[in-house]
Amino acid sequence: MGSTENGHSVGRQFGTLAVHAGAPHDPSTGAVIAPISLSTTYAQTSVGNPVGAYEYTRSSNPNRDNFEEAIAALEHAKYALAFSSGSATTAVVLQSLAAGSHIVSVSDVYGGTHRYFTKVAAAHGVDVSFSPCVEQEVEQLIRRETKLIWIETPSNPTLGLVDIRFIADIAHQRGILVVVDNTFMSPYVQNPLDHGADIVVHSVTKYINGHSDVCMGVAAFSSESLKERLGFLQNAIGAVPSPFDCWLAHRGLKTLHLRAREATKNATVVAKALEASPHVISVNYPGIDSHPQRKIAVKQHRDGMGGGMLSFRIKGGEKAAHLFCQYTKVFTLAESLGGVESLCEVPAAMTHAGIPRDQRETAGVFDDLVRMSCGIEDSIDLHADVLQALDLAVAAAEKNGSS
Ligand SMILES: *Cc1c(COP(=O)(O)O)cnc(C)c1O
């Protein structure tokens, strides 16, 4: 398990940790970059006495250890555990609960998390209550069996924010743990453990790896009992990432701070351009003053940064939203987020199509909502791309609508 207990990371700033945490020189060759350790098994000198720290790759592996150590340092955690996807991370956290447990969750969680809660966790006797405004409702929703409160902030795709400290204070009075899915912000923009969360989870597939070429997840926390329970399940369930994926994700992680700053800069430019456009109904972006929970962003996010994700409602309905995503030339029409390349999609028809319309619309996910993941291209090109696609899409939708 990766841990920051050896203390070399204390006091260092984010960029220094991103580059150096969990990245020791190879002691035998001096290699500055760790080799990819593909061996599945490790020699023992006598029965039960392995040559080094390793026995079998599912239980632990040097590349996974290095990655986990880096994440623990960046999330201000003592421990981190890597998994084969963000979804596997969620599954293991949920599997750690006894049958009969209850969870309170924000309603607009990631679609796969919603599916796991309702279709898989339910089958092993874990019940989930969803709340569209968890700060107001959490006290009424808590039961004697409540073991976890699951928060995603910002939410997907409407970028609503939750005050982590407020929820953690209520939860901790009752011995309940708080989990924050920090995928949208990345550890550079937000560190949930600093605001009272007990476990932070990520889809590493997004910002942490950052290059749209690895599927992986991670959980970070500081409690010894969580280390025992979740570490046991990591090995027992075996949903572990490959050494190669750990190595790639660790390489991506080393530039997270640079990428997160560029993505925020670009999303801010795009959000302001959208807000000023006559073709746009409304913009959801926590980095600008029009966001209804901007105060929480200022409190929870590094320098009040908004991150790289935003969404907006286009005039001209579903048709205009679909055409907008076809007419962009720098933004690629695709699901997922957090890579160096900019992406756009229509949640109602793609990532959130599985949620019934009335529930979707209550959460603000209308047919005309477009979600954008701003990459690290030059902002001038992203800005121009958005404006040209808006003009074309709205004009085409109007023409179509009047015929
Ligand atoms: C993508 C995503 C997940 C799931 O992660 P996978 O790596 O795709 O399994 C969970 N939460 C959020 C917020 C995500 O964006």
Image: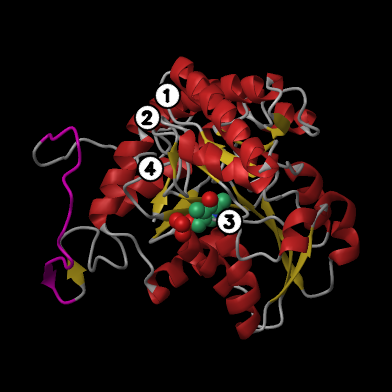
| Secondary structure at numbered mark 4 | loop
In the picture as drawn, the residue positioned furthest to the front comes out as 403
Amino acid at pointer 3: Ala
- Residue 349: give its label: 3
Q: Earlier in the sequence, mark 4 or mark 1?
A: 4
- Residue 258: give its label: 1
Distance between the alpha carbons at the discs numbered 2 and 1: 5 Å
Colouring style? secondary structure
Q: Earlier in the sequence, mark 2 or mark 4?
A: 4
Q: Is residue 39 magenta?
A: yes
Going by the image, does 381 lie left or right of 272?
left
Q: Residue at x 42, y 18 (%)?
A: 378
| Secondary structure at numbered mark 1 | helix
- The x, y position of residue 106, in whole percent, is 73, 56
Distance between the alpha carbons at the discs numbered 2 and 3: 33 Å
Q: Earlier in the sequence, mark 2 or mark 3?
A: 2
Amino acid at pointer 2: Thr
Distance between the alpha carbons at the discs numbered 1 and 3: 32 Å
For disc 1, the neighbor class at 10 Å (few under 14, some 14 to 19, many from 20) is few
- Residue 209: give its label: 4
Front one among 393 and 144: 393
For disc 4, the neighbor class at 10 Å (few under 14, some 14 to 19, many from 20) is many
